Image (cartoon, grey):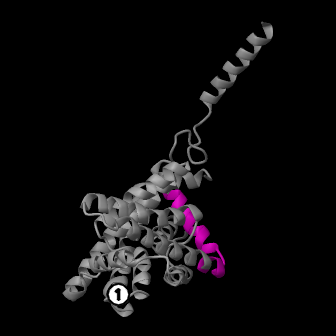
């Protein structure tokens, strides 16, 4: 009994000492998610890490992310085949594309639209003004995403695995994304605004994914904003790279330069604005004092 009483006393002492210890949230929170200021700090650190990688690593990770976009596009089309109910169609196509984003976020691949959030956060709070290395990385991630998306599209097309209903559904999806083409300058403006909304949502997908501390939470955090941007037909350049790569290699009614000049370019402009301003800048300055404290404490 004396040993048991002594063990109990030791346990009570340890618990009291633990209660007196400061809660080191930045390092290891006791909750099942990270608080917003910690997430913004993680964005900055990820942006710094991406920027510090050698060029070959940047290109390979961008290539990988682009390839996941084509896989996500193909899966979303396959899940949407034959679905008449609009709500169910939006849900399933969104879940399909979320598979591509989950692979990107969890593997650490470099996606242009995620970089629109990570690098500005890093520059706003850690390194100051933009410099040429940042622009170089931005461009390399964009090019790598396109090459990766085309590579997987070529493999899918060469495999002969998909039947005609897939290509019928693909054309329907492309028509939705290219509906702005006949509007001229007004169409460009609408795509830019749509691109702002898309990258705002993808920035929040990155936000929620970073917040989660387990794989289930990360998958759920990724899926919800992706379903929303797919359902809303918001123009997301990296996602469209997947769809357009599949379209270029099929008997689509659109040409590659129409995809580029009447969608990808204005969508990319909107994506940069949405990610950099409405996620990176907004949260960076909202939590500026908390981030400054973390830096002062070396956290």
Q: Residue 99 or 155: which is nearer the viewer?
A: 155
| The quarter of the displayed image where residue 82 is located | bottom left
Q: Residue furthest right?
A: 3
* Residue pictured at 37% horizontal, 59% vertical: 225
- In the picture of the structure, the residue carrying the numbered disc 1 is 252
* Residue pictured at 40% horizontal, 86% vertical: 250
Q: Is residue 277 visible?
A: no
Residue 237, placed above or below residue 37: below
Residue 271 horizontal side relative to residue 213, left or right = left
45 is within the stretch colored magenta: yes
Q: Residue 87 or 221: which is nearer the viewer?
A: 87
| The quarter of the displayed image where residue 267 is located | bottom left
Residue 227, placed above or below residue 194: above
Residue range corresponding to the magenta coloring: 40-59
Residue 171, placed above or below residue 50: below
Could you say where residue 78 lies in the image, as x and y percent from the top left? Answer: 40, 68
Q: Quarter holding the N terminus?
A: top right
Could you say where residue 229 lies in the image, as x and y percent from the top left? Answer: 33, 65
Q: Residues within 10 Å of mark 1 (few under 14, many from 20)?
A: some
| The quarter of the displayed image where residue 208 is located | bottom left
Could you say where residue 221 lies in the image, as x and y percent from the top left? Answer: 44, 54
Q: Is residue 76 visible?
A: yes
Q: Residue 250 or 239: which is nearer the viewer?
A: 250
């Amino acid at each position: 009994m004396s040993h048991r009483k002594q063990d109990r006393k030791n346990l009570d002492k340890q618990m009291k000492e633990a209660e007196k210890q400061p809660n080191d949230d930045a390092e290891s929170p006791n909750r099942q998610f990270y608080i917003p200021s910690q997430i913004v700090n993680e964005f900055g650190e990820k942006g710094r890490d991406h920027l510090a990688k050698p060029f070959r690593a940047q290109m390979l990770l961008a290539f990988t992310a682009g390839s996941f976009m084509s896989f996500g596009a193909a899966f979303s089309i396959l899940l949407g085949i034959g679905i008449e109910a609009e709500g169910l169609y939006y849900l399933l196509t969104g879940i399909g594309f979320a598979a591509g984003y989950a692979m990107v976020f969890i593997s650490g691949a470099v996606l242009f639209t995620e970089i629109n959030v990570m690098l500005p956060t890093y520059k706003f709070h850690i390194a100051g003004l933009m410099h040429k290395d940042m622009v170089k990385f931005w461009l390399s991630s964009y090019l790598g995403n396109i090459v990766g998306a085309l590579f997987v599209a070529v493999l899918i097309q060469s495999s002969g695995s998909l039947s005609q209903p897939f290509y019928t559904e693909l054309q329907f999806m492309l028509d939705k994304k290219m509906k702005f083409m006949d509007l001229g300058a007004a169409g460009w403006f609408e795509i830019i605004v749509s691109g702002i909304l898309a990258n705002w949502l993808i920035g929040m997908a990155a936000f929620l994914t970073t917040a989660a501390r387990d794989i289930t939470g990360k998958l759920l955090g990724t899926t919800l904003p992706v379903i929303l941007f797919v359902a809303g037909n918001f123009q997301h350049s990296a996602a469209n790279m997947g769809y357009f790569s599949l379209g270029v290699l099929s008997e689509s009614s659109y040409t590659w330069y129409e995809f580029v000049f009447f969608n990808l370019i204005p969508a990319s402009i909107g994506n940069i604005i949405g990610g950099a301003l409405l996620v990176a800048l907004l949260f960076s300055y909202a939590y500026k004092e908390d981030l400054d404290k973390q830096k002062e404490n070396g956290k």
